[in-house]
Image (cartoon, coloured by chain):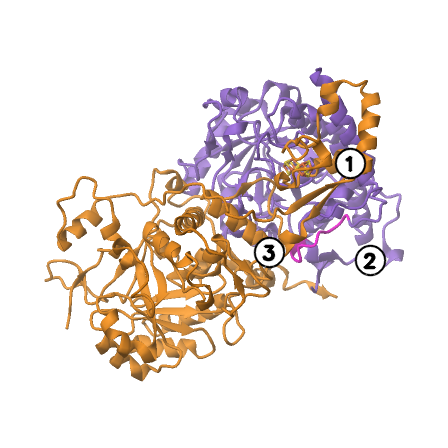
Amino acid sequence: MSEGDVVAKHVENLHRGLSALGRGEHPIPEALGNYRWTAELILATWQQAETGKPPTNGMEYKVGRSGGGFDRLAFKFLPPERRLPADLEPDLSIPLNRRPEGERIDIALPTYGGGMSFGSVSLNFMVARCMAARQLGTFTSTGEGGFPDALLPYKDQLITQIATGMFGVREETIQAARIVEFKYAQGAKPGLGGHLLSDKVTAEVARMRESVPWASLYSPFPFHSVYSVEDHKKHLDWVRTIHPKALLSVKVSTPTDVDMVAVGSYYAGAHILHLDGGYGGTGAAPEVAKKNIAMPIEPAIGKVHRYLVSEGVREQVTLIASGGIRTAWDVAKAIALGADGCVIGTAEMLAVGCTHCANCERGRGCQVGITTTDPLLSQFIDPDWGARRIRNLYESWKLQWRDILRSLGLRSIRELVGRRDLLLYRDR
Amino acid sequence: MNRPVNLFVPPWAACLPTNGCENLTRPGDLAILASMYQRFEIPTAPAPPLHPVPNKFLPVVRRPGLAWMLLREAFHYRFQRDVLLSRPCIYGVFSGPVGGFLPRTQLCVGCMRCVQEYPDVCQVFVDERWKALGDSYFTPDSISTLNYEATTGKIMVKGVGYKGPFAGEGFDGLWTDMSEIVRPTRDGIYGREYISTAVELGRKPTHVDPRAETVAAEEPVLELQVPFLFDLLPDACRGNGAEAAAIAAAARVRSLCLLPWRGLACAPIRRAEEAVVVPVVAACEAVEAARFLAGKAFPAIEWTDAAPADLPRLRSALPGSVPLLRVPLGSGTSAEVRALAAAGAGAFHVTADYHGRTADGSFVKDALLKLHDSLVEAGLREQVTLVASGGIVRAEHVPKAILCGADLVALDTAVWVAQGAALRGEFTRAGRRALDFPPLPPAWGAQRIVNFCAAWRDQLLEILSAMGLREVRRLRGELGRAMSYEDLEKEAFGDLERSA
Ligand code: SF4
Ligand code: SF4
């Protein structure tokens, strides 16, 4: 048997099926989707990844039916005659460094890719994300555990992570990236540290993480060297010593005192405050943690934004939100609540065929080649194809953001930051 | 009469392995045995359900479509056997002798790849039998989770974020806190540090006598290793093995099991397990039952038709014990419990229906908060134990009930569903035909209960470690470490213009 022929057969089928389902040519499968990612949102995302345009299949592509948060927010658009002309292209770029010193880095759209580590996702998918980030003029995060050499050609697009397990943290990996992110916590399992199940710790993953093949890896929680903001500052100073030009991002979860945490991180020297709300995440997590620990991202954004404003430091830090941000509309609402931009993970997986089935940790891993290290399944995502689909999704989002901005009379996405007055809260 | 009872001699100490200390047999030696350091763990073992629980996903293959597809592919791939036989399902649903013509539906995990590859041939439905599990409160999803926990003893771990509604009623409108830096750590779960899930039952002393030789309470105080015990089984479901299973499980998880006192005398309870049984008696029968209850440290008394004035009579009928007063939650509960606590009652079991609703229609979470606050206000909270029951059907409900003010909870429907009971219609009260509970081997039932208790305790540890708490006792009433939907919604969106 030629393994190549087997892969080719399934890839051909998958591509054809994604396309047909996205166009709405078949009945919506009853078992597809859930409250947050409804079947229509999933299919609409597949279609956008195919066409690069907002869906035309009549499916709901803006909100889910979770009954709260983004799903109850809407915009107060201007009457049609007061909107900006259709040929005006509002600026979508955002700055990642708002401090007076350090490298200026602007990204062309208000999002970048969230951390997905080598081992938790396939190498082909990682490369696809990097390629898309380069084409779009933005960044993507390697997650914890270092990154393989195959990503070095994309190092200008890379954010590398230092997480509590310190897996794969080496001077070379830090020096190669333009942005270094300290992962204190993550929304999918706030307060619980990373979790890479044994099946995914291949020899290659173990080599990079300097661990034992096929043994589960639990990152401890928290950083055992950080028990205060002063300790936290020492961490940032340590990276500044190794890589003085790097922008520093601090990724935290959303506890009750998230506003204090954010201000502490600002004073410790962070350029980017990355809040990761409780409902998102792409990695393995105990179900109990996803739903119950730490607040969802929507209330956290406003809380932190307002506190940073009241402390007089909001203009000097980039506030990035993540955790359950699914659509272009969610991003725009997060910005209106006070974020500068968002980190996207799951939607990028959806772009290449993810069904939000949550079987990532079962058996051989993801059946369509995303969250797997299985040698055969990993081949299902050709990096060029994956990059094209991720880019298309964002091209569609860009059209939607520009439309939203024109309808609000704004010329730049930066003007939308913290404009709560432009939001409506829907009754149930 | 003050009868000093050592604080930490648990009744199940008699069931502990003696580890070479067989000669420690006198009652006083039990204290030594129990105090020997032992990290508490709940040993689990696989216990698959006796009857298959319906699977959520039901893959359906259109047979004519499949035949046509096979023919088409045969030509397209030039009869290359391995390519033709390579199927879309990696979970073996189509790997039976006749492949997709007779799918093994029980193996389906709903990954949808078959639909993605062959949307004109395959469909995946949500099985009607799965949808019919449970009721509007104990949802099919909660039942599937419990079944997994009871089968494996493990926490359910999955990928890609949360899939449910933003928030819900009752416990679903509450989030627990986490701390970014200051804490004992997750290491507690993996063995390097210890996070305690032990709680005490009884009326706690308000002072220590410095002249006394040992720290002793005037009344019995019992330490349980988990903050839950097992509630009364509905009358109609007795005699199927579930009671014996719950008693055995209570002994293994170092907890207690409530049983009606009538019938206990003839129930086949092993001597070593007698200590975990809490007899339940109606207040009006307590005097009559006094001889039978003698020596029981914590008899439970149904306090439905009794008044605080009845308490002294009850206490004198049951000297040396702390009656656990079972009080239904309702509008007057706070005042009643406060009066009873002021009159010397030491332990309460406040009850709501199986959906967590109280007599006045509020949810157990809100009723508990009110009760806890009222006892704090009266300066009585530290002295009494509050056990709460009603609506505790998922692991996270335990810490959330404790956050709202309970010391521990009593488990009901979850224990029975774990042992294969099926709810018939909306199961809010123990009606005659509300529960379909087939006979079961007690050893199997006990293992199922032990397994889910182990998984629930592990999830409690996850929540405690995320909050930075070393012991569950510190969680009680700590609302500052929780976030409610109402508060968050007001703070986050209260200033926004509303629209229909
Ligand atoms: S296993 Fe399912 S949820 Fe996970 S990446 Fe694959 S398709 Fe998505
Ligand atoms: S949905 Fe997935 S698991 Fe179920 S039959 Fe289809 S391919 Fe197999």
On whether disc 3 and disc 1 are found on a single subunit, the reply is no
Q: Main secondary structure of the magenta part?
A: loop
Gap in Å between the C-alphas at discs 1 and 2?
29 Å
Q: Where's residue B188, x and y in %? A: 37, 42
Q: In the rendered image, which residue does mark 2 sit on?
A: A78
Q: In the rendered image, which residue does mark 1 sit on?
A: A49
- The chain letter under disc 2 is A
Q: Is residue A22 left or right of residue B2?
A: right
Q: Is residue B291 left or right of residue A192?
A: left
Disc 3 packing (10 Å; few <14; some 14–19; many ≥20)? many
Q: Which residues are magenta?
A: A61-70
Q: Where's residue A232, x and y in %? A: 45, 38
Looking at the rendered image, the disc whose residue lies closer to the viewer, 1 or 2, is: 1
Q: For this rendering, which residue is in front, A200 or A113?
A: A200
Q: Amino acid at mark 2?
A: Leu
Chain B display color: orange
Looking at the rendered image, the disc whose residue lies closer to the viewer, 2 or 3, is: 3
Q: Is residue B5 left or right of residue A126?
A: left
Give the residue at x 82% y 49%.
Answer: A406
Gap in Å between the C-alphas at discs 3 and 1?
37 Å
Q: Where's residue B240, x and y in %? A: 44, 58
Q: What kind of element bears circle 1?
A: helix
Q: Amino acid at mark 3?
A: Leu
In the picture, the quarter occupied by the C terminus of chain A is bottom right
On whether disc 2 and disc 3 are found on a single subunit, the reply is no
- Magenta span has B4? no
- The chain letter under disc 1 is A
Instruction: Note the chain letter of the purple one.
Output: A
Query: Visible in this render: residue A52?
Result: no
Q: In the rendered image, which residue does mark 3 sit on?
A: B133
In the picture, the quarter occupied by the N terminus of chain A is top right
